[in-house]
Amino acid sequence: MTPTARGIVMAALLSVATVASAQEAEPLRLRGRLAEEFAYRLHDPGDVSKLRTTGWLDAKYAFSEGVSLRVGTRAWYDAVFDAIDRYPAHVERDQKTELDLREAVLQAPRVMSTCASVVNRSCGARRSARS
């Protein structure tokens, strides 16, 4: 590898590391993905039966160093109901779109251990007063 190529590679790695460390400092992190599903019915009636786009979004928000909130969601939209008039209205209403909260976690380990130690101290003080 030539010195120029090495310099370019090092500069690229340094810029990636800088971007990664800048992203870690952000209190909000988002990750997501999309998937497309397509289904075609071969028997009568031979037509499209699914044209669904599904998306997943995971978010993490750090309130402080020890307290964070993590949320995971999923949503989908099936465009087959806009393309074909074969389905009854109640099926379209139930199956066209959906939004789910898959996970919601509040992490506060330091707060919980502080609360536990306060409770233990107060319980210990009561025990010694009773003896």
Image (cartoon, grey):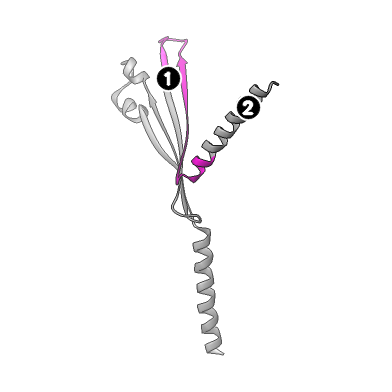
Relative image position of residue 53 (x, y in whole percent):
42, 24
Residue 109 is left or right of residue 27, and the answer is: right
Quick one: 62 or 37, which is closer to the camera? 62
Badge 2: residue crowd in 10 Å (few <14, some 14–19, many ≥20): few
Quadrant assignment, res 97: top left
Mark 2 and mark 1 in contact? Answer it, CB < 8 Å. Answer: no
Residue furthest front as drawn: 3
For marks 2 and 1 on the same chain, the one whose residue lies earlier in the sequence: 2
Badge 1: residue crowd in 10 Å (few <14, some 14–19, many ≥20): some
Residue numbers of the magenta segment: 21-50
Q: Residue at x 46, y 10 (%)?
A: 43
Distance between the Cα atoms at labels 2 and 1?
51 Å
Quick one: 67 or 47, which is closer to the camera? 67
Disc 1: which residue = 50
Q: Amino acid at mark 1?
A: Lys
Quadrant location of the C terminus in the rendered image = bottom right
Q: Residue at x 37, y 28 (%)?
A: 95
Relative image position of residue 34 (x, y in whole percent):
46, 27
